[in-house]
Image: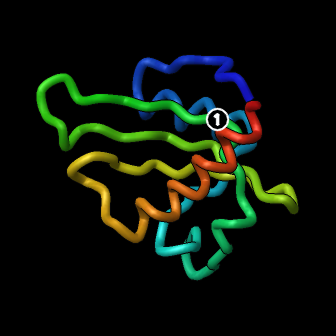
Amino acid sequence: MKQQFHYATITEAVEKLHQQGYTLDFNLQKDKLTVGDKEYPAAEFEIADLYRYEGQSDPADEATVYALVSRSGLKGILVSGYGVSSDSASEETLKQLHYKYQHSKQ
């Protein structure tokens, strides 16, 4: 899917995505997404859209906002740091999501 909007801040992106029905706020663990005590296999989700933000002076401020959709229609948001603030388990799971996203655009 081609990115349709650009939001100036992470906060604005999250607010607008919530308005578009992306109501779950995901956390990422190895091979799964969590919301509270519920767990969902990451493999069941695809990236519908993403927005990348880079800190102006601090690399630790770099983050990506993901709009995620499951095969069953669940929609949510994942905000993930990248670069120095990412961990290897999360990084592998994100690579799998990115791989599917890139191939769906072809």
Quarter of the rendering occupied by the N terminus? top right
Determine whether, in the image, residue 73 is placed left or right of residue 90. Answer: right
As drawn, the residue found furthest toward the left would be 57
Residue 49 location (% of width, % of height): 64, 35
Colouring scheme applied when the structure was drawn: rainbow
Q: Residue at x 71, y 58 (%)?
A: 45
As drawn, the residue found furthest toward the right would be 72
Residue 23 location (% of width, % of height): 67, 50
Residue 21 location (% of width, % of height): 75, 42
Determine whether, in the image, residue 104 is placed left or right of residue 38. Answer: right
Foreground of the two, 20 or 39: 39
Disc 1 target residue? 49
Q: Secondary structure at mark 1?
A: strand
Above or below for 49 versus 42: above
Q: Residue at x 25, y 53 (%)?
A: 85
Q: Residue at x 54, y 17 (%)?
A: 6
Foreground of the two, 98 or 21: 98
Quarter of the rendering occupied by the C terminus? top right
Assess disc 1: are there few (<14), some (14-19) or many (≥20) residues with their C-alpha within 10 Å of its C-alpha. some
Quadrant position of residue 35:
bottom right
Foreground of the two, 99 or 77: 99
Q: Residue at x 68, y 18 (%)?
A: 4
Determine whether, in the image, residue 19 is placed left or right of residue 13. Answer: right
Quadrant position of residue 102:
top right
Residue 22 location (% of width, % of height): 69, 45
Foreground of the two, 95 or 44: 95
Determine whether, in the image, residue 21 is placed left or right of residue 67. Answer: right
Amino acid bearing label 1: Asp
Above or below for 93 versus 14: below
As drawn, the residue found furthest toward the bottom would be 37
